[in-house]
Image (spheres, grey):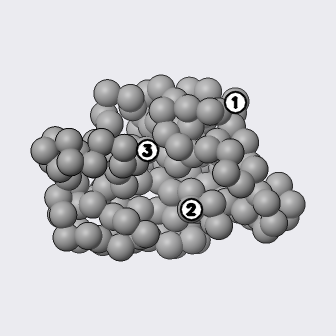
Amino acid sequence: MKIEISIRKQQLKLLDDQGNQLADYAVSTALKGAGEQKNSYCTPRGQHVVRAKIGKDAPINSVFRGRRPTGEIWTPELEAQHPDCDWILTRILWLSGRELCFNRLGEVDTMQRYIYIHGTPYVESIGRPDSHGCIRMRSEDVIELFDRVAVGTPVLITDA
């Protein structure tokens, strides 16, 4: 299995080992575009790997902070109480860069930037750039993807 994410197309493809497409999802990448620099709020490009899977069996729309479930379920009322929150919901696939000095280590480290593939309540922005650097998905889609991939799955992020 491998994952390919196109920033330009706002698309995530799940491929088998022979390159055959198994699934295709609309996503939302960074509003500020592509980039690897720490604190840039950009989506990092290049070769990555799923470092960790977080949230197995969590209810849909479970809220995560610091990669831990809070016990809350996202609702519009909860969002109204925290209007500036960048909600991370349902599942987390934490990414780690594989290319030294490009997306791994130092000021460009994807893992240390906490770049995830995760669920979002902002479904109206799926299909266009709107995140703070992560790859946002509909909660139903991230559950399906989460259940199909393993830790160690290669992830290629391009701006093509």
What kind of residue is marked 1? Ala
Instruction: Tally the numbered discs.
Output: 3
User: What residue do we see at 35% from left, 73% from top?
Assistant: 68
Alpha-carbon distance for marks 2 and 3? 13 Å
Alpha-carbon distance for marks 3 and 1? 18 Å
Q: Residue beneath label 2, please? A: 114
Q: Give the crowd class for mark 1: few <14, some 14-19, many >=20 residues within 10 Å.
A: few
What kind of residue is marked 2? Tyr
Q: Residue beneath label 3, please? A: 136
Of residues 146 and 83, the one nearer the viewer is 83
User: What residue do we see at 72% from left, 42% from top?
Assistant: 35
Of residues 106 and 102, the one nearer the viewer is 106
What kind of residue is marked 3? Arg
Viewer-nearest of discs 3 and 1: 3
| Above-or-below relation of 10 to 13 | above
Q: Residue beneath label 1, please? A: 160
User: What residue do we see at 38% from left, 29% from top?
Assistant: 125
| Above-or-below relation of 156 to 7 | below
User: What residue do we see at 63% from left, 66% from top?
Assistant: 111
In-image side of 18 versus 150 (left or right): right
Q: Position of residue 28 (x, y in %)?
A: 47, 36
Q: Quadrant of residue 91?
A: bottom left
Q: Residue furthest right?
A: 101
Q: Position of residue 160 (x, y in %)?
A: 70, 30
Q: Position of residue 7 (x, y in %)?
A: 60, 34
- Circle 1 sits in a helix, a strand or a loop, which is it? loop
| Above-or-below relation of 127 to 71 | above
